[in-house]
Image: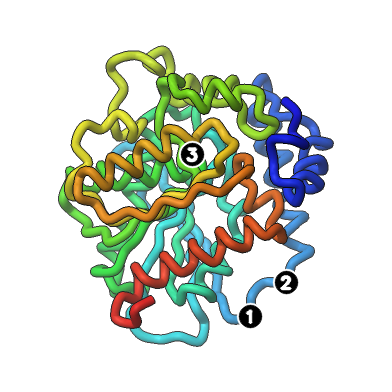
Amino acid sequence: MDIARVYDPELLPPLEMVLAQPPLNWDDLPGTRQQGLELQRQLLTTFPASPTVHKEDRQMPGPAGAPDVPVRLYRPSQVHGPLPGLLWIHGGGYVLGNIEQDDLLAQHLVDSVECLVVSVDYRLAPEHPFPAAVEDCYAALKWMATHADELGLDRTRLAIGGASAGGGLTAALALLTRDRGEVPLIFQLLIYPMLDDRDATRSTEIFAEAPIWNREDNRRGWRAYLGEAAGGPNVSPYAAAARAEDLRGLPPAFVAVGAAEIFLDEDVDYALRLAHAGVPVELQVYPRAYHAWDGIAPASRLAQQFAASRDRALREALHPQRGG
């Protein structure tokens, strides 16, 4: 793939820096996770923590028969009274990622949106295949709702969000939450979500050799999460939300995806299906953008445009009385 022709020129220098790093080692996922965690912790030391955000790590009860789930709470230190809440779900292809990787983003969202953010450190595949991850996320969401008074949350203003596999888990969690009927949700933030295990769209073919999360990575991620069921006829929509036949009654959604990544078709299709089901949805497709462009090239025009839209959509959803 000639990336100079496919991608926005402003996105190329940061991408080349990322590609200079060792590639994802599927044969040593624990080692890759540890390297990523150490790198993220080092990175965080170079950025001062927001003076207006209070952070707290907790262990909350996991699903029945499962271990406790680590969560990190972020709250405005200068704002009092019940706040809207966002459950944030990190990405990583269902096999990577941790609570540290979106620490700066969570702090930013607290300041920009004026909400409480709970970031969940769910169990990873293949050691913990489906439904471990989505059940951990559901446990965290239910914990937020049942402990709203203690946390200073307004339980009538709860949203969920995530990027990549975290976006896929967000969509699956929205379906699971709708069907269980225990926690009301008012919004879902789906950032280039990983939704479909079937690997059958045109964009997976066009961008099969993408430098960031290519077709083979995607297949491996789904196989790790779903095992031999991946791509077959018996995959639950709580694992791969694109499998859901009925999208009615889901919370309003914001969907964003790059125009030059394998998730383009499945994300656009899901947004259209949400709209056809009567779910309010905003879809944004970013031209010449690769997967995770906003995190790799945060100073770029496209990343800044996306961040402004994301924050605006969250503010409008969580503070409807302000009109955004």
Where is residue 289 shown, x and y percent of the image? 62, 44
Secondary structure beneath disc 1?
loop
- Relative vertical location of residue 296 with respect to residue 209 in this rendering, above or below: below
Q: Amino acid at mark 3?
A: Ala
On the picture, is 62 further left or further right than 41? left
Q: Disc number at residue 64?
A: none
Is 314 on the left or on the right of 237, as rendered?
A: right
Residue 135 position in % (x across, y down): 34, 40
Q: Quadrant of residue 258?
A: top right
Give the residue type that dot 2 points to.
Pro
Report the residue marked by disc 1: 51
Q: Which type of secondary structure does the marked residue at label 3 adopt?
A: helix
Q: What residue would you read off at disc 2?
A: 48
Q: Residue at x 69, y 35 (%)?
A: 6
Q: Is residue 162 visible?
A: no
Residue drawn at x 49%, y 62% is: 310
> Cβ–Cβ below 8 Å for labels 1 and 2?
yes
Disc 2 to disc 3, C-alpha distance: 28 Å
Dot label at residue 165: 3
Visible residue check, residue 260: yes
* Separation (CA) of disc 1 from disc 2: 8 Å
Contact (Cβ within 8 Å) of mark 2 with mark 3: no
